[in-house]
Image (cartoon, rainbow, N blue to C red):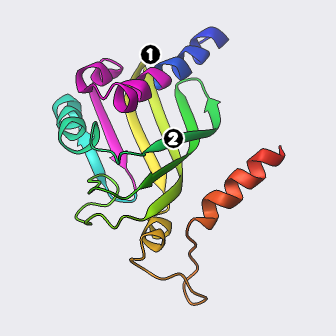
Amino acid sequence: MDKKEQNNLGDIFDKHIEYEFDKEDVNATMTTMTDDPYVLHIPTLTGGSGYNGVYNFYKNHFIGKMPKDFKITNISRTVGKDQVVDELVISFTHDREIDYLLPGIAPTGKYVEIPHVVVMKFKNNRISHEHIYWDQASVLVQLGLIKADNMIPITGIEQTKKLVEKCLKF
């Protein structure tokens, strides 16, 4: 794969995100994926497998289901031969239940910022899978569902603040 094709993977990734979050279009989102994709949110084990599983997950639990002030801030991107890794921050006010991130947790009204890592693998210029990582303990601390103290080595919004602070220096 030449450099132009590798850069194209980033464009496909961006189009996928546009369809998910800006256009909130499940059918368009699925056009960026293979016929047998999977999506896995590692901390909560939510997502879907196979075309129908991913489609149903997107339609019923993800696309169009985000908080009103949901925002994505890009930190870095690495484009490889057949995958793209994005490091980003998501932020939102927990004004609704968020099935993929906080299944079964009623809205708390609290503001949250979370460092995220998204790994997208490609086959023939289409997304074959997504692995999404974040620190669930940090989310639960920010929502007041668990307490960060000296006995438990977890942090809250400080993770995001430190990441952004460090990135701005470079």
User: Is residue 67 found inside the magenta-colored segment of the image?
Assistant: no
Closer-to-camera residue (118/70) = 70
User: Is residue 40 found inside the magenta-colored segment of the image?
Assistant: yes
Q: What x and y, as percent, mark residue 147?
A: 48, 83
Tell me which residue sits at (30%, 29%) in the image. 24
Considering the numbered disc 2 on the image, is that residue within a helix, a strand or a loop? strand
Front label number (2 vs 1): 2
**Is residue 131 placed above or below 103 in the rendered structure?**
above
The answer to whether the residue labelled 2 contacts the one labelled 1, judged by CB atoms less than 8 Å apart, is: no
Residue 55: mark: none
Which image quarter: residue 37?
top left
Dot 1, how many residues are within 10 Å of its Cα: few (below 14), some (14-19), or many (20+)? some
Q: Quadrant of the C terminus?
A: top right
Q: What x and y, as percent, mark residue 81?
A: 58, 23
Question: Looking at the picture, which amino acid does disc 2 mark?
Answer: Ile
Q: What x and y, as percent, mark residue 96?
A: 28, 55
Q: Which residue lies under the disc numbered 1?
A: 125
Question: Looking at the picture, which amino acid does disc 1 mark?
Answer: Asn
Tell me which residue sits at (55%, 31%) in the image. 84
Tell me which residue sits at (48%, 42%) in the image. 71
Q: Is residue 51 left or right of residue 166?
A: left
Considering the numbered disc 1 on the image, is that residue within a helix, a strand or a loop? loop
Q: Which residue range is magenta in the image?
A: 14-42
Q: Give the Cα distance between marks 2 and 1.
A: 24 Å
Q: Which residue lies under the disc numbered 2?
A: 72
Tell me which residue sits at (42%, 25%) in the image. 18
Q: How many tags in the picture?
A: 2
Which image quarter: residue 163?
bottom right
